[in-house]
Amino acid sequence: MKHIDILIIDDEIKFADMLGRRLSLRGITCHACYDGQSGLEWIKTHPGAVTLILLDLKLPDIYGTQVLETIKEIDPAVPVFIITGHGTREDETACLAMGASEFIHKPVNIEKLTTLLNRPRGEGT
Amino acid sequence: MTSHASDLVHKQGLQFFGSVNASISHELKNIFAIISETAGFLNDLTQLSKQGQTFDLCLLENCSNSIAEEIERGFDTIRQMNQFAHSVDDPVKETRIHDTLALAVKLTGFLSFARKTRLEPSGTEITIDTSPFLLQTLVYRTLRALYRAMDTSAELTLTLRESEASLVTLIFSHDQAVDLTDFPDFRTADVAEVLKAAFTKSDTGLALTLPRENKDLRDKFAGG
């Protein structure tokens, strides 16, 4: 199985860290940033380092859709999964139109998420 | 009070209730998401243990502490929600401004873009005769506009002053210059008008002056 490295961008530090631990137990390497700006900086300074990004929508500094837009400018190929506790249908439609691969509501089903993360690129990601 | 003002109470009130409820539900979802992940992690550890793998027992302690903290955060959120829900009990009443400010700070704290805010204790208990719900709406909208205009590192200080015998002033001081050109927006200005409140902007802050009594509001809602 291909090794997977992901970046989690979420301002709920405990959520990001706990999700990271659980995914690590499933063989997925996780990095975390806790606001939009530091997430974008991390992506710029680590080009090609992650195979996928998990992105929260409600961030303290930049709205998630703006972060998504910038990620797609930096690396159009990297899949981005939105993970949110607040997303509306309008948010979901907008994010998918902007290139997000998945729109996942919190709380997360870890097994479903792991399956999605392990899915080879090209199958919807 | 004009019929416009009366309509405003209902339309703005409903919009405000919706907005606050949305941010509270977001907060509760985040809390449940953390508890869910932590419980899931405990289950992961249990499965590992069943397979004969060992792990640091401090992990269990950290998880139980985290769940307890999040439950307390949830109760605190529900307390704010309850206090907010009761702000519509009396259309007009003698209102403790410090309580209104404290609740507005907590409710806006649920917004993802909330900034660090300090509420200065007031030496004496200051009350005004007004609509507690509309006052809550006005303070909330003001804080929300300031947070949007402030950098993430900026801090806000709220101070309450008795400026004159008939007036009370709320001062929102920020430690960085902010662009409030578009403030107050028309909705906020409408609420301010009904409350007979006036905004004064400066480089270092915003002052909101309110009358101690609002006879028009009392006549309209309390038959006074």
Image: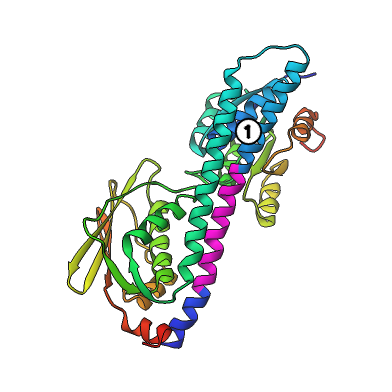
Question: Which chain's residue wears label 1?
Answer: A
- Quadrant assignment, res B165: bottom left
Please provide percent x and percent y for residue A90.
67, 57
Residue A41 left/right relative to B163: right
- Quadrant assignment, res B19: bottom right
Q: Nearer the viewer, residue B32 or A116?
A: B32
Q: What's the residue type where badge 1 is placed?
A: Asp
Q: Nearer the viewer, residue A104 or B130?
A: B130
Quarter containing the C terminus of chain B: bottom left
Quarter containing the N terminus of chain B: bottom left
Residue A110 left/right relative to B55: right
Magenta stretch?
Answer: B12-31
> Does the segment drawn in magenta span residue A50?
no
> Does the segment drawn in magenta span residue B26?
yes
Residue at position x 54%, y 54% in the image: B23
Magenta region, mostly helix, strand or loop? helix
Please provide percent x and percent y for residue B185.
41, 67
Please provide percent x and percent y for residue B203.
24, 54
Residues packed near mark 1 inside 10 Å, few (<14), some (14 to 19) or many (20 plus) = few
Residue A28 visible in the current orientation: no
Residue carrying label 1: A75
Helix, strand or loop for disc 1: loop
Indicate the colouring scheme. Answer: rainbow
* Looking at the image, residue B58 lies above or below residue B7: above
Please provide percent x and percent y for residue B59.
59, 21
Residue at position x 59%, y 53% in the image: B25
Residue at position x 76%, y 21% in the image: B47
* Looking at the image, residue B174 lies above or below residue B163: above
